[in-house]
């Protein structure tokens, strides 16, 4: 595993086509506007106020997280540094590298958290225990 830090996780501006009278459209296209090819899309919605999601890391998975509607906060943690991002624009995507712990909270009413993922679902790719995550970060291959 390459050992990415939270500073390797960035906000990406997606293509946005604006029409004064008809609203906007944003486009994500494999091989062109994003750093990996998307194999899976899922989205969180109807998250009750005050609830949080995430609380895990992925070993290999890369993700782009988009606030398709409303807003929420994503806090990234590489075991040393935490960084929080408020997502509230449908044309921005937070790029999360593998091996980063994430918590998602502060969902607005009607928020839709859309996730574009580099791999199909694999339960074995999750680290759901924070101590195990810290051990994983400390024991793996040298930092890049
Ligand atoms: P999880 O990834 O833990 O959601 P969150 O990080 O938003 O809290 O997934 C919640 C549940 O949904 C878990 O039981 C696994 C299941 N799930 C799938 O079956 N396929 C998927 O692609 C995803 C993302 C989750």
Image (spheres, grey):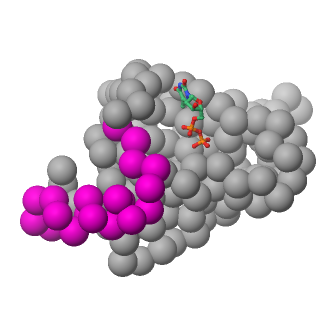
Residue 70 visible in the snapshot? yes
Quarter placement of the C terminus: bottom left
Q: Examine the rendered structure and indicate whether residue 116 appears above or below residue 77.
A: above
Q: Quadrant of the rendered structure where residue 113 is?
A: top right
Question: Residue lying furthest bottom in this view?
Answer: 80
Name the residue: 27% across, 64% down: 135
136 relative to 116 in the view: left or right: left
Name which quarter of the figure residue 79 lies in.
bottom left
Please provide the residue range marked out in magenta: 125-144
| Rendered-image quarter of ligand 1 | top right
Where does residue 28 sit, x and y in percent of width and height? 51, 30
Q: Is residue 127 magenta?
A: yes
Q: Is residue 136 magenta?
A: yes
Identified at 51% across, 72% down, the residue is 83
41 and 17: which is toward the camera: 41
Instruction: List x then y, in percent, for residue 68.
Output: 71, 38
Q: Which of the pair 124/96 is nearer the observer?
A: 124
Q: Residue at x 34, y 33 (%)?
A: 124
At 26% from the left edge and 59% from the top edge, which residue is drawn?
136
Q: Is residue 101 above or below residue 113?
A: below
Q: Is residue 16 visible?
A: no
111, 141: nearer the viewer: 141
């Amino acid at each position: 595993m390459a050992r990415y830090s939270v500073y390797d996780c960035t906000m990406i501006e997606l293509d946005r086509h604006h029409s004064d009278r008809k609203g906007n459209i944003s486009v994500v296209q494999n091989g062109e506007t994003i750093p990996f090819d998307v194999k899976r899309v899922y989205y969180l919605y109807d998250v009750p106020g005050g609830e949080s999601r995430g609380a895990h890391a992925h070993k290999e998975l890369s993700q782009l997280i988009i606030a398709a509607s409303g807003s929420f906060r994503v806090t990234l943690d590489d075991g040393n540094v935490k960084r929080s991002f408020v997502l509230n624009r449908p044309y921005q995507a937070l790029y999360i590298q593998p091996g980063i712990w994430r918590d998602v909270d502060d969902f607005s009413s009607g928020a839709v958290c859309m996730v574009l993922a580099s791999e199909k679902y694999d339960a074995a790719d999750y680290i759901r225990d924070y101590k195990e995550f810290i051990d994983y970060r400390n024991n793996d291959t040298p930092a890049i």
